[in-house]
Image (cartoon, rainbow, N blue to C red):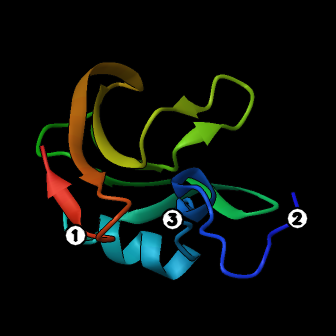
Amino acid sequence: MEKFPGSQPHSIENKRETILSSQEVLDALSQYIEGYTLGRELSDEQGVYLREVERTGENGGETIEYQYMRKGNHGRQNVSTETAISVIYYENGMPVGGNRVAILNEETGEWRRV
């Protein structure tokens, strides 16, 4: 769409998705989990859209995983309506619970705890 001098672009055109670098994603995850090991990192042409880190839980066979997911449809059931960090609890390799812990405010770039 051609832009004319002095014209104001529509608000949709001004709104850009926040894309965090790999290090920014790890920094955000570090606010919620310590002593983790790196898991999967998936990227597309824009950058990281999925990052997982995990640590061993208190009980034998227990694992705690924190997952960053960027807003969007990234295929293979990797879909999120907002950029968020979630926690998933595993016992003996099977998921037993979890929830969203933070959502990225696209306008301010700040994480809001849920």
Q: CA distance from mark 2 to mark 1?
A: 49 Å
For residue 55, what is the image quadrant? bottom left
- On the rendered image, what quadrant is the C terminus found in? top left
Q: Are marks 3 and 2 in contact (CB under 8 Å)?
A: no
Q: Is residue 66 above or below residue 22?
A: above
Judging by the rendered image, the residue that carries numbered circle 3 is: 18
Judging by the rendered image, the residue that carries numbered circle 1 is: 34
Q: How many marks?
A: 3
Residue density around tag 2, few if under 14, some if 14–19, many if 20 or more, within 10 Å: few
Residue visible at 55% across and 59% down in the picture? 17
Side of 80 where 63 appears, left or right: left
Judging by the rendered image, the residue that carries numbered circle 2 is: 2
Q: CA distance from mark 3 to mark 2?
A: 25 Å
Residue 105 percent location from the top left of the image: 29, 58
Three-letter code, disc 2: Glu
Residue visible at 59% across and 56% down in the picture? 10
Three-letter code, disc 3: Thr
Counting residues from the start of the chain, the first of labels 3 and 1 encountered is 3
| Dot 3: element | loop
Three-letter code, disc 1: Glu
| Dot 2: element | loop
- On the rendered image, what quadrant is the N terminus found in? bottom right
Q: CA distance from mark 3 to mark 1?
A: 25 Å
Side of 22 where 31 appears, left or right: left
